[in-house]
Amino acid sequence: MAQIVVFANRKGGSGKTTLAFNVASLLADNGNRCLLVDTDPQAHATVHAGLEPLKITFSVYEALVSFLKNRQTVSDPTLSINSNFSILPANEELSALELELKDLQNREGVLKDFLLELESEFDYIIVDTPPSLGLITINALVASQYLVIPVKADFLSLVGLSQMMGVYYRVNALLNPELKFLGIVPTIFDVRTRISKEVLNQLRATFGSNRIFTPIRSDVKVMEASGHALPIHKYCPRCRATQDLQTFAVELLRRIGGNG
Ligand SMILES: Nc1ncnc2c1ncn2[C@@H]1O[C@H](COP(=O)(O)OP(=O)(O)O)[C@@H](O)[C@H]1O
Ligand SMILES: [Mg+2]
């Protein structure tokens, strides 16, 4: 059965999508069967994977709508990027999903029910979320076992964090008692600035050092890699962001394994 990890933070530009895509690719290249689920109508994870949202005919939106209609997952709803790495892509249409879900009784649990039938095909399912705390993000939190919150290391990002944690506690209490908060990853971390270090210290003081992953340093190669639709470990195997991502993947698996 797949382990399902969601990357969420209501703030855009936190590094969610970059982390979700790169971690899924890295785990896949390490021999794990990975599915990346793009639940953001902006479809940045989909683009990062080298797909053109406008040309996608079967997105996560179609998959969920068809599931709602027929109560079963169509066979093979995912797109294969390479032998171990598949994606459920998004496009703009996904923004209509909130409206379609709004009046349903099980409106928060549709993605969970849908993924149930795919779980045996993958070792890890990584869910990227939109920068909002609407029904789509709630569905992602309800469908997952593990939550990771990427945070850009600046003070404004800390402000939104308590709200994100509040949502986690509510979802955990009311909708998904299985959801475990694994921790916060400082992203786009500029080691040269005092503000980055202050934010890191504040995060450690607030949440405890064992809830703060090793930061992912800011690296222009990360942006270049996304422009080439490549994961950073393939685009620049020796870059600092690649080293940090590898460290993050190890920490993530250790925490999923229950030792972290
Ligand atoms: N480690 C990093 N170093 C440099 N730029 C990064 C890094 N991680 C993410 N970025 C860039 O920051 C921007 C926001 O990242 P993104 O993953 O799209 O955030 P979100 O999904 O939270 O909106 C993107 O342009 C991305 O390329
Ligand atoms: Mg994003």
Image (cartoon, rainbow, N blue to C red):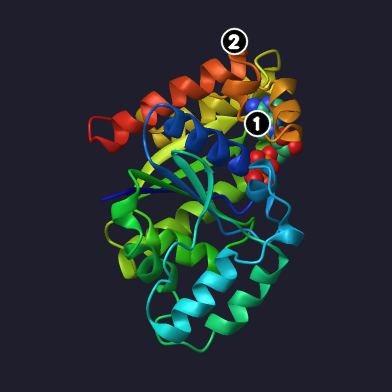
Asked whether, in this view, residue 76 is left or right of residue 55, the answer is left
Residue 58 at x, y = what percent? 60, 66
Q: Is residue 132 above or below residue 23?
A: below
Residue positioned 43% across, 32% down in the render: 27
**Which residue is nearer to you in this view: 98 or 206?**
98
Q: Name the residue under label 1.
A: 230
| Residue density around tag 1, few if under 14, some if 14–19, many if 20 or more, within 10 Å | some
Q: Which amino acid does label 2 sit on?
A: Arg
In which quadrant will I find the C terminus? top left
Residue 149 at x, y = what percent? 50, 43
* Outermost left residue: 258
Residue positioned 64% across, 69% down in the render: 94
| Residue density around tag 2, few if under 14, some if 14–19, many if 20 or more, within 10 Å | few
Q: Is mark 1 on a helix, strand or loop?
A: loop
**Which residue is nearer to you in this view: 106 or 36?**
36
Residue 217 at x, y = what percent? 62, 21
Let me know if residue 217 appears in the view: no
Q: Is mark 2 on a helix, strand or loop?
A: loop
Question: Splitting the image into four quadrants, where does ligand 1 fall?
Answer: top right
Residue 240 at x, y = what percent? 60, 14
Q: Nearer the viewer, mark 2 or mark 1?
A: 1
Q: Mark 2 points at which residue?
A: 238
Q: What residue type is labelled 1?
A: Leu
Q: Is residue 41 above or below residue 147?
A: below
The Cα atoms of the two marked residues, 2 and 1, are separated by 14 Å
Label located before the other in sequence (2 or 1): 1
